[in-house]
Every structure is written in structure tokens, then in C-alpha cells.
């Protein structure tokens, strides 16, 4: 973890917005008296997304909620970021297109402010595209509901709030294990994390715990004995042997350093 | 394997019927001078399925092609099975509903004839529902494109041409890893095999090889360290730790006894 002081709340999309709202409550609870900044830069419809989240978080008791949006990196230059980020405790990235997020914000001053929130013990949260950007590398193309073809990958540098992870979202719902396995095959040292809709991981220190109704998949490639990904032609189907797979559900805990799930029955979680 | 003399060709559905037809060719090649019997008992539209396959196999050079269909087990009693199965070298199960297949044919005399073909070194082939019935246990319900809920499983006894396997089909295309993981969690001694559309495994002796454009997934639960499946309530999301996952593509070979994939680069396959 690059900035171990803070918390990451990484949601696989479609978090509950109308019922118990447990995941959004968890985010709201971390604002305690500070400020929540909602970043809609991933979205094509920020004017819809921003008021929706503002209302939800207001009802969840958050007093200070601010909106950050930009269409081009240059817009960031003229913003009063110091004022915006004053007393910010939580930054929330909405869904949309993860490339919009990184291409608009990457390298701008706003990233420094976001990382500062994290370093001071604040929380960075994101859903869907806002989840994908948290890792070191993010998936921006590849198959839904298909097995992976050797040449069919598209990745981009993420915001790297957490090291050596590739995070995928809408995981079971969009049948994305193929593309995440493809990413793990390219470098088995990277840990693949697939988060279902309505489900989040809460990363603190070197562990994460699961919250939400569905599952989280961990693909650990460290024991991989063979893959054809660097040898086969682009249109061939990828093969990979001996991936370690964990399916985790609430309230399980995963140790990122040891790469092991702490089983509930042993009282570790 | 219960009847190690014969060959099984198990197809994940949607095999190529118009292009190269490599998988169907592989089946046709095994008839050599004998008879091919097409069983449409799984299908709701046998009058469409039977002529379609008859034409394809005829074009692939098969001379003797017979049709077997029944709506109820009692119909089997009045059939001249001895004549039908005389010189039968290959039996092909079409798609449809796997429960129709087992509930109509299970326990009837026709099963004895089918197994006799297999014992004599013949080939049993099946696609989609016709693939699912080959294993010891078959999945008949459960989730597509969802993670597995603890209580949400439906299984039925298969035709058991091969031991200790659960076969699932349309695998990546319908997002079925959740339900197959659920099956493996219930008894990690069983090997889960998920076959993609357009792809087949050819099982001979204690090995199978892959043929076709997509992938085959092997879920090996023997190293599993934890699952909540027997403890959690029915609506909880299943968790399972330390599943060994292999993704295989043509022309790889998997050893069912050793439960290892033979990597191509080592020259074993």
C-alpha cells in the first residue's frame, strides 16, 4: 500500500441507494464533521449523478458535501482547490468511464489534494469506474461473458492508491473472470480482485474486508505453472494453469500481504 | 472412468455447424462404417433438431444415421432397440433440457444399449444439455451471471459415463462459474469442468484434450481450506477459499487422475 494511513472503499457498482444503503452509510460515517467531495469526472451525466448522491448523503447525515467535475485537465488550474479540499475527509468517485477519470485528473494538482486526504487518514471511495481507478493498472477493454483471447487486452495506468492490484467491477454480473484472468496471466505478480455489484471491499492497512450482498473474487497467480499468453497468436484463446481462486463474502477478511483469506470459523476475521 | 474403453466428446453448446465444423467432423470420423444414433430426447423441437443434424452428418460422410426420440420412458419398451443399435459406433445427444434426457431414458433399456456402445470402444457425444448428462451429477438450476448463494443449488443424478465430474456448458458465455463453484464447494472431491460454447473436451482413458475456439475451465477443490456452504443461511453469498483453477485451450491436455494440465511447452501434450 502506498499510503497506508487512509481507507479505501471500493465498490463493484450498483451499490444499494434506496434500501438499507449499508455501503454508502459506511462512507458517510467516515466524514464525521469533515467534508465529502463527490467527483463525477467519470460520468457523462454529472448533472444527474451529483444531485442524486448529494441527496443520499445528505439523508445519511453528511453536512458538508461538495462537487468536483471537470471536462479537461486545464480546468483544474483555475479552481480554488485549497478551499475545496479544506477539511475534506472523504473523496467519492462516481461511476462512468475510468479513462475519463484518469485522463482528466491524472497529473493535475487535484491528485495531490486527493492523496493528501488519504495520507491524513481520510477515505477514498469509488464505485464501478470509480473502483477500477484505485488500482495500479486498470482494465479498460476486454471481454464480457467470454473467455479471454491472447491479444485482446486493454489496460491503462490507474490512480495507484493501492499497489499491485488490478480491480474489476460488475464482476459476476458481467461475466468478467475471463478478462481478469488475462490480466493475471500477463503478470502473475499482480493480484486480481473482481468485485460484484452491490458489494465492496474496505481496504485498511494490509487487509480488506467484504461488505455487501454478493461476492468478491481474488485471483492469485503466484503459483501459476503455465500460460500461453506471451507465445500464442492474438486470436487464440488464453490458457493458464494453477491459478489460486478465492470467493469471499461478508464478513470475510483477506490479507493482502500474505495473500490468504482469513476464515471466519478460525476466529481470525 | 467407469467404462474406459470408449471415447466421450463433450461439447459446451453452439458447436460450429456451418463453417469448418471441426468438432462435428471429429464425431463423424468415429462412425467409420458403423452407425450414428442421434438422440433428441432433450429437445422440445426434435422435428427440427433431428433433420438439421442428419443433414450435417450426411454431408460429413456418415452413411448410416438413425434417430432416437421418446416422450415417456414407457415408449422405449416397444422399440426394437436391438435393430436400432446394431453396428452403432457413435451416439450423439443433442441439446435441450438435461432433465428431459435423464428422466426419460434413465433406468430404461436404452441406457444399457448406449453403455454397450461405449464399452465396445464407441463414442458418446453430447452438446449443451447433452454434455451435462455425461457426468456423475448435473447442474439443473442455479445462477447465470451471479455469484452463488448458499442455498441456491439444484442438482440431479447424471448418466455417469464419467466418474467424479460435474460438467457445465455455455460456461463463460452465460457466466456460470458461480454455480459450478457452488457444486465444488458442496463436495471438493468432485472436479468441476466448465466448457465454453464452440468448444469440446475429448475424453479418452484418464485424459481429455480440448478442441474448439474457446476455453475449458477446471475447478479443483481438493486444496480448499474453507467454505461457508454448510453453515451459512440459504440467502447468504457462498465463500470458498483456495480453489485451484485451470483455463485450458486447444490443444491442451488434462490428466483427470493427476488433476494436472499438461503444458504444451513441456512437450507432454
Image (spheres, coloured by chain):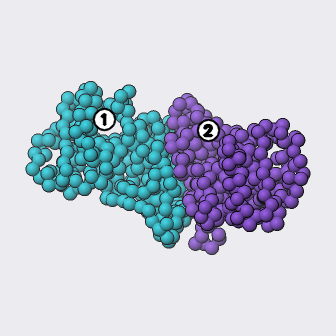
Chain colours: A purple, B cyan
Q: Chain of mark 1?
A: B
At horizontal 36% and vertical 55% (from top left) the residue drawn is: B140
Read off the residue under disc 2.
A141
Q: Quadrant of residue B99?
A: bottom left
In the rendered image, the vertical position of residue B264 relative to residue B133, given as above or below: above
> Closer to the camera, B258 or A236?
A236
At horizontal 24% and vertical 41% (from top left) the residue drawn is: B46
Total numbered circles: 2
At horizontal 53% and vertical 31% (from top left) the residue drawn is: A235
Q: Chain of mark 2?
A: A
Give the percent coordinates (x, y) of residue B134: 32, 50
Q: Is residue B235 left or right of residue A189?
A: left
Read off the residue under disc 1.
B27
Circle 2: element type: loop
Give the percent coordinates (x, y) of residue B167: 39, 50
Q: Is residue A260 left or right of residue B10?
A: right
Circle 1: element type: helix
Q: Quadrant of residue A156?
A: top right
> Closer to the camera, B103 or B33?
B103
> Closer to the camera, A31 or B61?
A31
Q: Quadrant of residue B154?
A: bottom left
Q: CA distance from mark 2 to mark 1?
A: 36 Å
- Inspect this view and state whether residue B224 appears: yes
Do the dots labelled 2 and 1 sit on one chain?
A: no
Choose mark 2 or mark 1, whichever is in front.
Answer: 2
Using a 10 Å C-alpha cutoff, classify the residue at mark 2 as few (fewer than 14 neighbours), some (14 to 19) or many (20 or more): few
Q: Is residue A135 left or right of residue A211?
A: right
At horizontal 81% and vertical 56% (from top left) the residue drawn is: A118
Using a 10 Å C-alpha cutoff, classify the residue at mark 1 as few (fewer than 14 neighbours), some (14 to 19) or many (20 or more): many
Give the percent coordinates (x, y) of residue A95: 67, 48
Amino acid at each position: 500500500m502506498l499510503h497506508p494511513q487512509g481507507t479505501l472503499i471500493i465498490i463493484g457498482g450498483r451499490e444499494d441507494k434506496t434500501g438499507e444503503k449499508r455501503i454508502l452509510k459506511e462512507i458517510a460515517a467516515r466524514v464525521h464533521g469533515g467534508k465529502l467531495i463527490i467527483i463525477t469526472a467519470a460520468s457523462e451525466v454529472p448533472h444527474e449523478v451529483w444531485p442524486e448522491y448529494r441527496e443520499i448523503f445528505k439523508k445519511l447525515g453528511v453536512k458538508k458535501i461538495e462537487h468536483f467535475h471537470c471536462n479537461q485537465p486545464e480546468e483544474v488550474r483555475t479552481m480554488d482547490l485549497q478551499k475545496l479540499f479544506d477539511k475534506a475527509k472523504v473523496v467519492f468517485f462516481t461511476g462512468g468511464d475510468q479513462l475519463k477519470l484518469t485522463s482528466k485528473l491524472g497529473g493535475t494538482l487535484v491528485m495531490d489534494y486527493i492523496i493528501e486526504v488519504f495520507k491524513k487518514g481520510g477515505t477514498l471511495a469509488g464505485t464501478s469506474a470509480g473502483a477500477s481507478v484505485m488500482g495500479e493498472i486498470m482494465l479498460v477493454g476486454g471481454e464480457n461473458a467470454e473467455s479471454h483471447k491472447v491479444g485482446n487486452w486493454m489496460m491503462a495506468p490507474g490512480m495507484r492508491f493501492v499497489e499491485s492490484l488490478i480491480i474489476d467491477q460488475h464482476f459476476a454480473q458481467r461475466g468478467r473472470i475471463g478478462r481478469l484472468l488475462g490480466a493475471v496471466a500477463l503478470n502473475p505478480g499482480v493480484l486480481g480482485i473482481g468485485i460484484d455489484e452491490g458489494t465492496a471491499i474496505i481496504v485498511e492497512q494490509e487487509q480488506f474486508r467484504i461488505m455487501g450482498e454478493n461476492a468478491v473474487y481474488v485471483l492469485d497467480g503466484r503459483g501459476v505453472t503455465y500460460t500461453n499468453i506471451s507465445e500464442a497468436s492474438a486470436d487464440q484463446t488464453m490458457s493458464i494453469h494453477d491459478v489460486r481462486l478465492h470467493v469471499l463474502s461478508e464478513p470475510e477478511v483477506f490479507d493482502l500481504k500474505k495473500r490468504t483469506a482469513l476464515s471466519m470459523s478460525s476466529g481470525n476475521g
